[in-house]
Amino acid sequence: MKLLNLAAAALIAVLAVAQAPAQTVRVGTFHKQSIVVAFYRSPLWAATLANKKMEMARAKALNDTKKVQELDAWGSAQQEMAHQQLAGEAPITNILEALAPACLPEIAKKARVAMIVADLPYADSSVEKVDVTEMLLDWLQADERTRTIVRGLK
């Protein structure tokens, strides 16, 4: 009798779960090329470049040719990577790492999303896509010129 009651309770629990409506998961998405443009035109990137320019000036003043060559190589590599990222041929890992500590959690909270992803090629009906591109542009302090460029990309 106990075994029958236990089996009946398990069956009721399984049926209840099966009939419960699927909970919607909100996922933030963004237009990758827009964020690439906004990042490299942002005050955040400008600060990085300013630091590298100061390092370059110091290296030149000290006649440190090795450091000058390293910084030249860094600049060329960064420019090439930005071009590849814009073309969609390179991951935007460096950009996401720069945004991760403060920006992404803040935007996820504002947009009420469980996660933020660049690409979501498929999602079933239990997933609600929320475009957070504009919020990212705001956080990156995109000026009107940047927003004009971004509008042309979409």
Image (cartoon, helix red, strand yellow):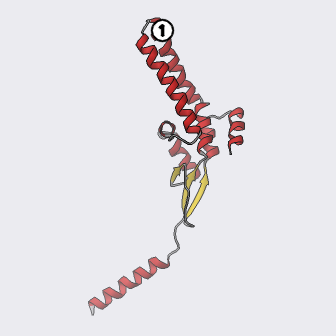
Q: Nearer the viewer, residue 77 or 151?
A: 77
Q: Is residue 77 left or right of residue 36?
A: left
**Corner quadrant of residue 4:** bottom left
Give the amino acid type for the residue marked by disc 1 in the picture. Answer: Lys
Judged from this view, the residue extending furthest toward the left is 2
Q: Residue 54's spot in the image, x, y percent?
A: 50, 15
- Determine the residue positioned at 68% across, 42% down: 153
Quadrant housing the N terminus: bottom left
- Determine the residue positioned at 47% across, 15% down: 55
**Corner quadrant of residue 65:** top left
- Determine the residue positioned at 59% across, 57% down: 129
Label 1 neighbour load within 10 Å: few <14, some 14-19, many 20+:
some
Vertical order, 139 against 115 (above or below): above
Q: Nearer the viewer, residue 86 or 14?
A: 86
Q: Residue 96's spot in the image, x, y percent?
A: 50, 40
**Corner quadrant of residue 43:** top right
Count the labels in the image. Answer: 1
Vertical order, 3 against 16 (above or below): below
Q: Residue 18's spot in the image, x, y percent?
A: 46, 78
The residue that label 1 is drawn on is 60
Q: Secondary structure beneath disc 1?
A: helix
Q: Residue 110's spot in the image, x, y percent?
A: 58, 49
- Determine the residue positioned at 47% across, 24% down: 74
Judged from this view, the residue extending furthest toward the bottom is 1
